[in-house]
Image (spheres, rainbow, N blue to C red):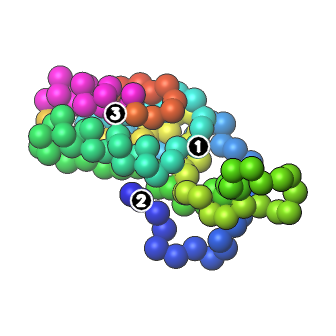
Amino acid sequence: MLQPKRIKHRKVHKRRFPTIARKGNTLSFGTYGLKALEPSYIKSSQIEAARRTIARYSKRGGKLWIRIFPDKPFTAKGAEVGMGAGAGSLSHFVAAIGAGRMLFEMSGVTEEIAREALRLAGHKLPIKTKFVKK
């Protein structure tokens, strides 16, 4: 799964959530893409599940670009732990996604294969997505 090799701070403050993507909202590398329609946090495990689905359906043909990276550490407290006493331990990494952000791009495959592969990958993500082409 994707995660940073090293981070400056193990726990970070919550920052303002990006509601609309100001960058990364157009096709830059591939011919077909999967675009987010709503803002959310996406876990590294969800990105990996979507990537595997695309690779499996396209029979590893063509080229795939992952346009997001989970660089925000997320903390969680253990079960049955009381309120207070600060943040919990590091649980997983997430990518903060704004609406309109391009998540995946593909090229080198037919439109039918790309459309179906990206549709299946969209089911692995916790947000609504849309297929786009150049």
Is residue 90 highlighted in magenta? no
Q: Which mark is residue 121?
A: 3
Q: Secondary structure at mark 1?
A: strand
Quadrant occupied by the C terminus: top left
Residue nearest the observer in this picture, 49 or 117: 49
Q: Would you identify the image quadrant in which residue 107 lies?
A: top left
- Asked if residue 62 can be seen in this view, the reply is no
Mostly what secondary structure, the magenta segment? helix
Label 3: state its secondary structure: helix
Q: Which region shows up in magenta?
A: 110-123
Which comes sooner in the sequence, label 1 or label 3? 1
Q: Amino acid at mark 1?
A: Tyr
- Disc 2 residue type (three-letter): Leu
Q: Quadrant of residue 52?
A: top left
- Mark 1 highlights which residue? 41
The reply to whether discs 3 and 2 touch (Cβ–Cβ < 8 Å) is no
**Residue 118 can be seen, yes or no:** yes
Residue nearest the observer in this picture, 45 or 42: 45
The residue that label 2 is drawn on is: 2
Q: Amino acid at mark 3?
A: Ala
Picture coordinates of residue 11, whole percent (x, y): 69, 67
Where residue 104 appears, as percent x and y from the top left, is 36, 42
Decide if residue 72 is on the left or right side of residue 50. right
Query: At 43% across and 49% down in the image, what residue appears?
Result: 45
Residue at image coords 67%, 73% = 9
Residue 3 position in % (x across, y down): 46, 63
Residue plotted at (25% across, 25% down): 115
Q: Is residue 122 left or right of residue 16?
A: left
Q: Gap in Å between the C-alphas at discs 1 and 2? A: 14 Å
